[in-house]
Image (cartoon, helix red, strand yellow):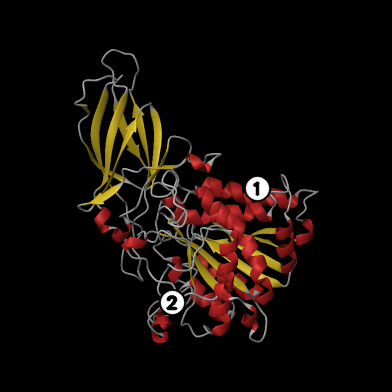
């Protein structure tokens, strides 16, 4: 049997192109076991061209490396192969400055594992001379998947919707009294459903949307964690039971959750855009005379969600993302937009403090610096958090999770893993519970807050801070 290595990206969410592969050569070592070496040169495939931003975004990658021909105890047969993988256009991606400190993810298991911690980090990952490189020694025949961050496949998305729907329609479901619903708000450019799960009997309306940028797959892991808690899957009170805090917020809120805003881009392996190149987080309002947004033709995903929000209203909004560069969980608010003021600022600070108390990955110090002026925010009103918070005069935030390891709680083996993203989603319930009393409170309610609950204007971390 000939020793071979084959690279493919035809799976759901796959993205890579193979440029070349060096000849397999025996390792210089004469010691057993016999091993071969080779180099595989790859490049990331760009998204569809974005008309508004005049760019073809690219950064996310996911591919399968299949080895065959390894044999043990077969004379001169090779027992392992060490491959140097190099992404040669890493310098040309949307955020090349994010590569230092990145460790790519890999697994020899399934793309849809029963245990998401099967994904590990490759510590040999490095960025130099415009290339992202790592080495991996394959010791058995079969598949190894490599990804910028573990994929959240469309099949898994469909299973999440199905599981929640089944849970809500059980005859003895504890969710029945909270009027659960699974509906389609519309269809994507390529005809996929825009599913929305709603639940709760309260007067406050909260919207949580995830994965506007499809390559930020940690956002849908977050959605899974949130929905599993809201539906009572494997809670601390036992299987299929709602915990007390969850029951409490379901009486306070009507929750609307969109697990994936950009399913077309997710299936295509895009980093930031849908099937026709729309960056959905620039489609929430018309801010340029020659570019209308949202539209049914270019951004039906945003159009359908915003139309539903106009019907339900909104008292709390969270847009869940991932950030390539900053190794922290952090929040961005509608700072210096027209409705920003003491009320929103103090609600923002208090909510993040509530979240910190629930999950130690959350922090306030590092994040995106605020815009320089109110005038500059005019061109930023096409972003979801800015538009929604001003449209409904509500607390709106963007949550960012790291692709890298999380500097608040480092884990070199797994980094900021899917399990941690799911836990952050589960813990949103506690933060929502903490802030509920104040979302529509009148007067200077923030006088009740302690100093640790104050708003902190974030700064971008320097190299010594972990970037």
Instruction: Tell which of 373 and 328 is nearer to you.
Output: 328
Label 2, secondary structure: give it.
Answer: loop
For residue 344, which quarter of the picture? Answer: bottom right
Q: Is residue 108 toward the left or the right of residue 102 in the image? A: right
Number of other residues with Cα within 10 Å of mark 1, as a class: few under 14, some 14 to 19, many 20 or more: some
Q: Point out residue 84 in the picture as x, y percentages from the top left corner.
A: 26, 38
Q: Point out residue 248 in the picture as x, y percentages from the top left corner.
A: 74, 63
Q: Is residue 29 toward the left or the right of residue 140 in the image? A: left
Q: What whole-number distance in Å separates the C-alpha atoms at marks 2 and 1? A: 37 Å
Is residue 56 depicted above or below 42 in this figure?
below
Q: Identify the residue under disc 2.
A: 292
Quarter of the figure with the C terminus: bottom left
Give the number of the disc on residue 163: 1
Seen at 26% across and 51% down, the residue is: 127
Q: Is residue 262 toward the left or the right of residue 256 in the image? A: left
Q: Is residue 291 toward the left or the right of residue 76 in the image? A: right
Q: Point out residue 265 in the picture as x, y percentages from the top left corner.
A: 44, 56
Label 1, secondary structure: give it.
Answer: helix
Seen at 22% across and 27% down, the residue is: 27
């Amino acid at each position: 049997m000939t020793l071979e290595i084959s690279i493919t990206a035809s799976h759901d969410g796959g993205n890579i192109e193979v440029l070349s592969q060096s000849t397999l050569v025996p390792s210089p070592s004469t010691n057993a076991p016999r091993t071969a070496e080779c180099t595989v040169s790859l490049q990331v495939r760009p998204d569809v061209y974005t008309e508004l931003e005049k760019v073809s975004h690219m950064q996310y990658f996911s591919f399968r490396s299949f080895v065959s021909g390894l044999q043990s105890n077969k004379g001169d047969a090779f027992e392992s192969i060490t491959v140097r993988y190099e992404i040669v256009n890493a310098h040309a991606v949307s955020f090349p400055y994010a590569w230092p400190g990145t460790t790519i993810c890999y697994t020899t298991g399934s793309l849809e594992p029963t245990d998401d911690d099967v994904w590990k980090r490759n510590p040999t990952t490095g960025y130099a001379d415009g290339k992202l490189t790592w080495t991996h020694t394959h010791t058995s025949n079969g598949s190894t998947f490599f990804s910028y961050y573990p994929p959240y496949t469309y099949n898994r998305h469909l299973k999440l919707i199905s599981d929640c729907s089944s849970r809500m329609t059980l005859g003895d479901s504890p969710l029945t009294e909270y009027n659960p619903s699974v509906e389609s708000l519309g269809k994507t450019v390529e005809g996929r459903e825009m599913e929305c799960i709603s639940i709760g009997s309260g007067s406050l309306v909260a919207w949580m949307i995830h994965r506007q940028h499809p390559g930020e797959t940690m956002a849908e892991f977050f959605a899974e964690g949130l929905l599993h808690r809201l539906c009572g899957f494997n809670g601390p009170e036992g299987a299929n039971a709602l915990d007390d805090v969850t029951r409490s917020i379901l009486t306070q809120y009507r929750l609307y959750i969109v697990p994936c805003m950009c399913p077309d881009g997710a299936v295509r392996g895009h980093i930031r855009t849908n099937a026709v190149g729309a960056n959905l987080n620039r489609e929430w309002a018309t801010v340029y005379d020659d570019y209308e947004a949202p539209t049914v033709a270019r951004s039906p995903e945003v159009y359908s969600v915003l139309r539903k929000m106009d019907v339900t209203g909104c008292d709390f909004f969270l847009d869940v993302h991932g950030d390539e560069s900053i190794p922290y969980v952090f929040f961005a608010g509608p700072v210096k937009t027209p409705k920003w003021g003491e009320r929103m600022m103090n609600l923002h600070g208090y909510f993040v403090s509530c979240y910190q108390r629930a999950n130690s990955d959350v922090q306030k110090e590092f994040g995106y610096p605020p815009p320089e002026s109110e005038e500059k925010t005019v061109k930023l009103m096409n972003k979801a958090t800015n538009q929604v918070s001003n449209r409904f005069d509500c607390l709106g935030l963007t949550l960012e999770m790291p692709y890298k390891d999380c500097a608040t709680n480092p884990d070199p083996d797994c980094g900021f893993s899917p399990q941690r993203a799911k836990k952050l989603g589960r813990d949103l319930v506690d933060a929502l519970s903490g802030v509920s009393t104040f979302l529509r409170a009148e007067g200077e309610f923030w006088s009740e807050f302690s100093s640790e609950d104050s708003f902190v204007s974030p700064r971008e971390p320097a190299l010594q801070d972990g970037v």
